[in-house]
Amino acid sequence: MEAIGARQRTRRFDSTGPGGELIRAVRPAAAAALSAAVLLAAPALAHETLHELDRARAIAVRAFESDGEPLGDAAWEVYSPADPRAPWQRGRTDRNGWLSFVPDAPGRWRVRVIEPAGHGLDLFVEAGAAAPESAAGAPPSGAAFVLRPLAGLAAIGLLFAVIFLVQRRRRPSP
Amino acid sequence: MHVPDGFLSPQLSVPAYAVAAPLWAWAVRRHFGRGAAESLPVMGSLTALAFVIQTLMIPVPGGTSTHLVGVVVLALLFGPLVAFVCEALVLLVQALFFGAGGITVLGVNALAMGLVGPLAGWLVWRLARPFSEKAALFLAGWVATQAAALLLAGALALQHRLDPAYFPVPIAVNLTAMMVPSLTVAGVVEGLYTVFVLSLLRKANPRGVAA
């Protein structure tokens, strides 16, 4: 039954069979309608979202506390060198304290991370060909985590030791 | 707790320096002169300890964190002006070595955490010590933390009113974010730290510390 039906359908659209004149007359109109549909559909392609992947364009900044704890979910603002008054972009840091943005001009971009409790960052990041790959202020890890407080301790200890020695020398002997 | 560079405008940071600078000069002349040699080792050790504990963050429920200040013990042992100078030194080292806090806001931070906080703690300790020494020490630590946090929150709130571009967080949000951890966690831990350190020092009875 299926084969017979297929044959009948084939015959119905065969231009050499009965009704062929009608098909021949309609064909240019159908082609014109199809072309019009394709041409009219072309602008609709603008609704499709395409993407471009570039792994080297964004600048990423990580905000963390002095003990290495990340500043997660903190509000941030980025200011373009072209307009230092109005924020160019705003957002919130991820759970690891990272924020990222894609600068559209070279120069010094200002990055601010603002916690409601008054903690945060306010720094300038160089963007452009001359910008260094990695800026100072990497998260403390391993030896650096211990060495930085030790350097501060040494500075405080040294200052007090100097004052102590000076004052002991100046103190009148009993 | 301390405010970083860029969060306060010169309208606030310059007057803060104008108030702090003469007080630093007076405090150094008065407390770090010839007679201070015996006290300097303990002062230096407590300043170094304050520096360390200010880098350690205490997690607070709700996702934020806070830290101790640790200089109220200096105020109780040697006077509030000693705490002011030592806290300024801690803040200076933090700014220079870690980029934490900052130089422009050092006056505001030092006035809050080094002077107003320890001074409030010292006054409470003087009032409460006839009743219970340990309770007075705890209260001194707790009150010092609240006074410092309140002054910093006030400075940020004033900045928000003057120019929100420097500090865009609304006053209510800032006040809540600063005072809730301070009242519930930082103040309590600071109080316990003050009791512990002072009790330990009195037992050890080092030279230069009044019994």
Image (tube, coloured by chain):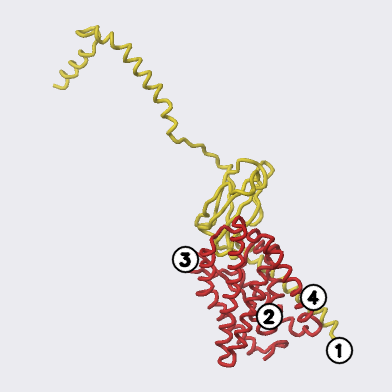
Mark 3 to mark 2 CA distance (whole Å): 33 Å
How many numbered discs sit on the rendered protein? 4
**Which residue is pictured at 67% across the width and 44% down the height?**
A107
Residue B78 visible in the picture = yes
Q: Nearer the viewer, residue A145 or A89?
A: A89
Mark 3 to mark 4 CA distance (whole Å): 44 Å
Q: Which residue is mark 2?
A: B80
Tell me whether marks 3 and 4 sit on the same chain. no
Q: Residues within 10 Å of mark 1 (few under 14, many from 20)?
A: few
Q: Position of residue B100 (x, y in %)?
A: 65, 63
Q: Which residue is mark 1?
A: A173
Tell me whether marks 1 and 4 sit on the same chain. yes
- The subunit carrying tag 1 is A
Q: Nearer the viewer, mark 1 or mark 2?
A: 2
Q: Nearer the viewer, residue B105 or A167?
A: B105
Q: Which residue is mark 3?
A: B62
Residue B87 tag number: none
Mark 2 to mark 4 CA distance (whole Å): 23 Å
Q: Position of residue A31 (x, y in %)?
A: 34, 15
**Which residue is pictured at 22% across the width and 15% down the height?**
A10
Q: Which residue is mark 4?
A: A162
Task: Answer with mark 3 or mark 2, whichever residue precedes in sequence.
Answer: 3
Residue A151 visible in the picture = no
